[in-house]
Image: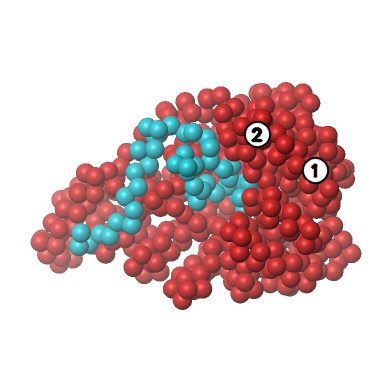
Chain colours: A red, B cyan
Amino acid sequence: MQIHQYKSNGLNIILDVPGGSVHVVDEPVYEAVGILRENRDEDEVRRAFALKGISSEETEEVLGEIRELRQQGLLFSEEPYAPSVEAFAKRKTVVKALCLHVAHDCNLACRYCFAGEGEYHGRRAIMDYETGCRALDFLIANSGARHNLEVDFFGGEPLLNWETVKKLVAYGRSLEEKSGKHFRFTITTNGVLLNDEIMEFCNREMDNVVMSVDGRKEVHDRMRPFRKGSGSYDLIIPKFLKFAEQRRKLGLKYYVRGTYTRWNTDFAADVLHLADLGFDQISVEPVVAPPEMDYALREEDLPVLLEQYDILAKEMIRREKEGKGFNFFHFMIDLTGGPCVYKRLSGCGSGTEYLAVTPWGDFYPCHQFVGMEQFLLGNVRDGIVREDTVESFKRVNVYSKPACSSCFARFYCSGGCLANSWNFTGSINDVYEIGCALERKRVECAIMIKAALNE
Amino acid sequence: MKHIKTLNTKNLQETLKKGGCGECQTSCQSACKTSCTVGNQSCESRK
């Protein structure tokens, strides 16, 4: 698909898919492009417009403008990427990011946890300092010429192993000058153990912090209870607000990040609740769950979920115009810059540029594959031992996934999440249909917001 | 133009010529841990 056109919030939007240009057009252009994209010629547009009583003067004006954009490569542009991306996929990759599972244990018992209450369907475990150091050594040794190295402290709940986190940050910093590298540390936390000392340390050392909260109290507490059943909302919200405020003042990145499930298909209210509380960097994502789970999203939920993104988008525009805007991660889109086409088409890098490390030092393609033994890639002592598996991840790109070739969103999602694909289809080279439908909607809304605010 | 307002004149084809430098962030290290979102990331080669 080379052209994507849609109507949203009273706007006619046309996206030149291969080139990335976006046009807001009037009704005649919208209709003319609809005819031309079906490989029908200008005379067919003339005939169709004559039947509608559109003057020939206006018809020629419309066709002239479309022709001009085509000549400039901004409409009906070519897609010459496949050979380059295939070649790019064969390049020698370096490791640039690790997800360090410093604790396979958790003080919450979130019902949708893909890690099975933090244990990843294995044993409870805590990463020791030595294992963490070897992971950072491995990252430096395998990062080639890459300057910025990303390390996310993840779990389970990483604050259950806070002393090790601090020591590993210090160890990483001690390697920077000698290696010429820079570590960007991040942490993802449920907030239960968050305190002033931890906030102060994170504000000094962490490039980004991700705070897990789902939205409204009843929604959050239903899915994110303590092990004994009581909700965690009241404990974490004041701490997250304080933390977010500190980071905002310091100009540091943070996100509150939530998950929506079948129990809150009206999730726009949760995003807005977080904004009303005072958070201005918000990410709320669809749950990824086996279809048999009662909270899993179903295909029949899609109309409601898609509408929620429309509701959210319109409300965000309203607030932005009133000077009370906030950022929703999944509506972020950079129409003028953004990543190069290689990045856009070659996927997230899991299994090649990005690895997850278990508490005992095993490597997996990403945090979502941890515990699936067929995806064990190696460990911090021996390095990568399953080059064949790494190779299979490396070769995944949008051109290796048949479903992506007809999807306009392929330049925005890069073929989607490999773990989702595996979980739902048994192949890393396929797609998760519900996730795709939601992603397409998010891209449409993101572009519409830009268009509406540009008016 | 009278009928068309172009929001951006992005030409992704141009980025093909430079090649991928690989300095950009990995997707899941930001704020998504369950879905792949790449289009919203920034290019770091300009820095």
Quadrant that contains the C terminus of chain A = bottom left
Give left or right: position of A381 versus A77: right
Residue with the most extreme right position: A228
Residue found at x 78% / y 37%:
A132
Give percent across and percent down for residue A246.
66, 64
Give left or right: position of A412 versus A152: left
Q: Nearer the viewer, mark 2 or mark 1?
A: 2
Q: CA distance from mark 2 to mark 1?
A: 17 Å
Give percent across and percent down for residue A277.
64, 73
User: In front: B17, or A85?
Assistant: B17
Give percent across and percent down for residue A314.
47, 71
User: Circle 2 sits on which residue?
Assistant: A177
Callout 2: chain: A
SS at badge 1: helix
Give left or right: position of A22 versus A39: right
Callout 1: chain: A
Residue found at x 18% / y 65%:
A52
Q: Which mark is residue A167?
A: 1
Q: Earlier in the sequence, mark 2 or mark 1?
A: 1
Residue found at x 29% / y 48%:
A75
Would you place residue B13 above or below residue A154 in this image?
Answer: above
SS at badge 2: helix
Residue type, label 1: Lys
Q: Residues within 10 Å of mark 2 (few under 14, many from 20)?
A: few
Quadrant that contains the N terminus of chain A = top left
Give left or right: position of A404 versus A101: left
Residue type, label 2: Glu
User: In front: A57, or A34?
Assistant: A57
